[in-house]
Image (cartoon, grey):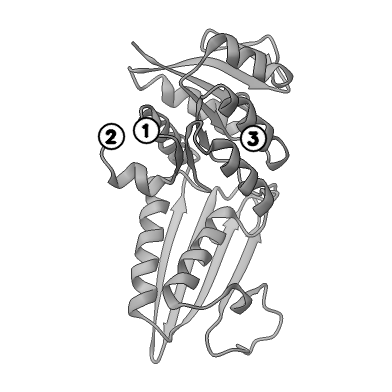
Amino acid sequence: MKTKIAITGVRGRMGKMIVDELARVPDLMLAAGFDLEGVGELIDDVTVTDAAHLTDTLATIRPDVLIDFTTASAVVENVRAATDLGINLVVGTTGFSDQDLDTMKSLIDGRAAAVISPNFSVGVNVFWNIIEVAARALRGYDIEVIEAHHRGKMDAPSGTAEAAVDILTRAIEIDRDSVVYGREKGTRLRGEEIGVHALRAGDIVGDHTVLFAGPGERLEIRHQAHSRQAFASGAVRAARWIVGRPPGIYSMKDVLIQKKP
């Protein structure tokens, strides 16, 4: 029996790529697609449903997993609708607040399994692991985080960059007060600080660089996404993995290193 997948934002760029990726995985199938536009259209033989009818449709179709790549303003209610029905989740939406994240955690707790990640690219998740190792080994080196995305991206810095900052601050044991966004003065004001810089231009899919600079040398660790296909394939991989997991919140790191029971 195939695993049934529902997608919010199914007509968006990511939604369409996820649909294409599902078609390549024989044990997964698109069971429902939701959007605010194109209602009534067919996508892979599934009729696009108005997002306003998300709860009723989920209750009727009972998909195994809901994949959400929508907006920060919509994600909490989408999570609420899924968890009320015990439907597992893959959430790739970014830009939500700490309060939103806390609300989602409380909704998911004991009700469903969810993979939540600011970036579902397998390469980015390896990138995060590498920068943690580098930061511990290069303690005392200056650190700068630079990210670049297309001109229409709404949040800045990106969720991927913020995740990198979280990893780096933990690795070198400094607090968030030592993170400087968009430095205006050239001099580094603190002994240990992390500079974060966001670029928005053209149609850049997603570039992330962490620069470590020390006496007489520098190391740059970079990930570049050439296509959103990297995110879509990771999200589908997570959706396939999450079925059968105990309730709780998981990361892509769990997906990549843990075996399915």
Provide the residue designation for mark 2: 260
Q: Residue at x 58, y 58 (%)?
A: 148
Q: Amino acid at mark 1?
A: Arg
User: With 44 as the anchor, is 183 left or right in this view?
Assistant: right
Quarter of the image that includes the N terminus: top left
In primary-sequence order, the first of circles 1 and 2 is: 1
Residue 51 versus residue 218: which sits nearer the camera? Answer: 51
Find residue 56 and name its label: none
Q: Answer with the quarter of the image where residue 244 lies.
A: top left
User: With 222 as the anchor, is 79 left or right in this view?
Assistant: right
Q: Residues within 10 Å of mark 3 (few under 14, many from 20)?
A: many
Q: Amino acid at mark 3?
A: Thr
In primary-sequence order, the first of circles 3 and 2 is: 3
Q: Position of residue 7 (x, y in %)?
A: 56, 24
Q: Position of residue 188 (x, y in %)?
A: 60, 88
Q: Is residue 97 visible?
A: no
Q: Residue furthest front?
A: 110
User: Label 1, label 2: how many angstroms apart (C-alpha)?
Assistant: 8 Å
Q: Position of residue 104 (x, y in %)?
A: 60, 41
Task: Give the label, 1 or 2, closer to the camera.
Answer: 1
Count every numbered label the image shows and give the total.
Answer: 3
SS for tag 2? loop
Q: Residues within 10 Å of mark 2 (few under 14, many from 20)?
A: few
The image shows residue 127, relative to residue 251, as above or below, that is below
Q: Residue at x 52, y 85 (%)?
A: 192
Do labels 1 and 2 touch, CB within 8 Å?
A: yes
Q: Answer with the quarter of the image where residue 23 lies.
A: top left
Residue 81 versus residue 143: which sits nearer the camera? Answer: 81
Q: Amino acid at mark 2?
A: Lys
Provide the residue designation for mark 1: 245
Provide the residue designation for mark 3: 70
The image shows residue 230, relative to residue 222, as above or below, that is above
